[in-house]
Amino acid sequence: MKICVHNIKCDIDNTGDRVIDLAAKKAGISKDSVLTWRLLKKSIDARDKTDIKFVYSALLEIPRGIRFKNHKDVKVYLEPTVSELQIGNVKLQDRPVIIGSGPCGLFASLLLARYGFCPILIEKGGSIEERTAKVKHYWDTDELDENCNVQFGEGGAGTFSDGKLTTGITDPWCDFVLKQFVQYGAPEEIMIDAKPHIGTDRLRETVVNIRNDIIRMGGTVLFNTQMQDVSFHNGSVQKITTNDAVIPCEVLVLALGHSARETFQMLLSKGVPMIQKPMSVGVRVEHHQSMINEARYGSFASKLPPADYKLSSKVNGRGVYSFCMCPGGVVVGAASEKNTIVTNGMSYYARDLKNANAALVVSVGPADYPSEHPLAGVEYQRMLEQAAFIAGSGKAPAQRIKDFFEGKPTCRFGSVIPSYTQGVTPGSMEDCLPEYITDSLKEGIRSFSRQIQGFMADDAVLTGVETRTSSPIRMVRNSEYQCIGFSGLYPGGEGAGYAGGIMSAAVDGLRIAEKIIRKYSPCK
């Protein structure tokens, strides 16, 4: 029998022996009766900075018949498993096609390949190897490849991020995703960390290993290939046209990512139903990581990993919150169109760089967009990105927080040096963001400074603009995950408006693959 013991609090210097001692005591059993045990989760309780604790959940295997305390922190353990899928009986004439190799497309392809469907995975950008070189070239020279960049290419936008695997969803597929990442090279601690992350460096290696396994199982991966058209017959998918070929298919998975603007337009022209969706826009904020560590952990800072934060506030009916916080990271150029500025945050696995950064964003929605057109949110994003390019004279505009609150442009920076990959132009956020955004950011920062001492430090830096927090559209689909009015068309992940992050996008891709597997059987 297996039981799970939660909320086991230990001093941060304690060893695993102390964890099992406390777990057995909490369960009301003898330590000697525990046959095997392992950690399930580990987190940090830093609410009292004078007495910070590690908090564990542990899985204990005990003989049947042993009596234990059954209360909120001690329960019989139910393994989060995904049952074996029964292949459907609708025979496919063609191989399924997946557009986009981000988490949604990658995991949909992986599951389909394991069940013998030999998927064709199509990616607009290049492989990790090619993409990494092109992104570095962009950061070094400002010469942007609009098809292969931080937004487009193998692994999706999350490849150049912190590689966070946190999510608000509860789904058995989440555990599956973590196990696959570990199987393909991610650090094993992501299985127990309450806030797991891989880091951009380890994530790139893992993505390549998944790709190679998809190919080994009969899948095909086509890089530098863009879907330019899709054809339907009597409401069913018939074929797609790429820049290289015409590919027949009855099943088409749209794992496009949140920046596939050309493809959104093409699909809309074909009658694919789309609606506007709320999103958030704002800036990147940078502090010294050592300050964040001290503010979060006090005297324990030197004994703990780099600290993160997650902050939120409500200002005049709008949400203001931190997003994609990157401890010990760097602010990166993430544009996918020329003459625009887009920021994002990235950390390596070690999280050992000098600055901490996070997006500080404000919720916006259809009422803020320039029209009722389904793609008006895209136009709203583009407007801010072009304004930032102009405000920074081709670089990212950046401003000290002190100057931001005093309403004056920054002339030079203080102790916090902006880390943006292509360099910044000192200036003002008011030159590229609407007043209702800057006013909301000011109120949000005031609120956050009450939660983290030093958050409103004079020399902290804001860099604009952050616009790609999520997709501004949603493709309408039914309970079978198919686009309404189009048989065989499966929109999913962040681009279709059904996910927000690596984990939820991967799970959405797996759910789509599950629907396909249960309905169809592979072609020869």
Image: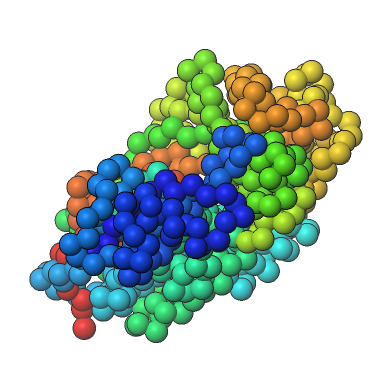
Residue 92 seen in this snapshot? yes
Quadrant for residue 298, please give it. Answer: top right
| Residue depicted at 50% across the width and 39% down the height | 378
Toward the top, the furthest residue is 316
Name the one closer to the observer, 63 or 397.
63
Query: In the picture provided, is 333 more to the left or to the right than 362?
Result: right
359 shown above or below 91 = above
| Residue depicted at 52% across the width and 15% down the height | 316
Residue 332 seen in this snapshot? no
| Residue depicted at 66% across the width and 31% down the height | 452
Quadrant for residue 94, please give it. Answer: bottom left
Instruction: Residue 268: give x, y in percent of width and height.
Output: 36, 45
80 shown above or below 417 = below
Toward the left, the furthest residue is 89
Instruction: Residue 82: give x, y in percent of width and height.
Output: 25, 63
Query: In the picture provided, is 207 more to the left or to the right than 462?
Result: left
Quarter the C terminus occupies = bottom left
Quarter the N terminus occupies = bottom left
Instruction: Residue 475: give x, y in percent of width and height.
Output: 33, 44
Instruction: Residue 247: give x, y in percent of width and height.
Output: 34, 72
Quadrant for residue 472, please give it. Answer: top left
Name the one closer to the observer, 222 or 162.
162
Query: In the picture provided, is 514 more to the left or to the right than 408?
Result: left
| Residue depicted at 44% across the width and 74% down the height | 183
Q: How many marks?
A: 0
Query: In the picture provided, is 413 more to the left or to the right than 520?
Result: right
Name the one closer to the observer, 516 or 78.
78
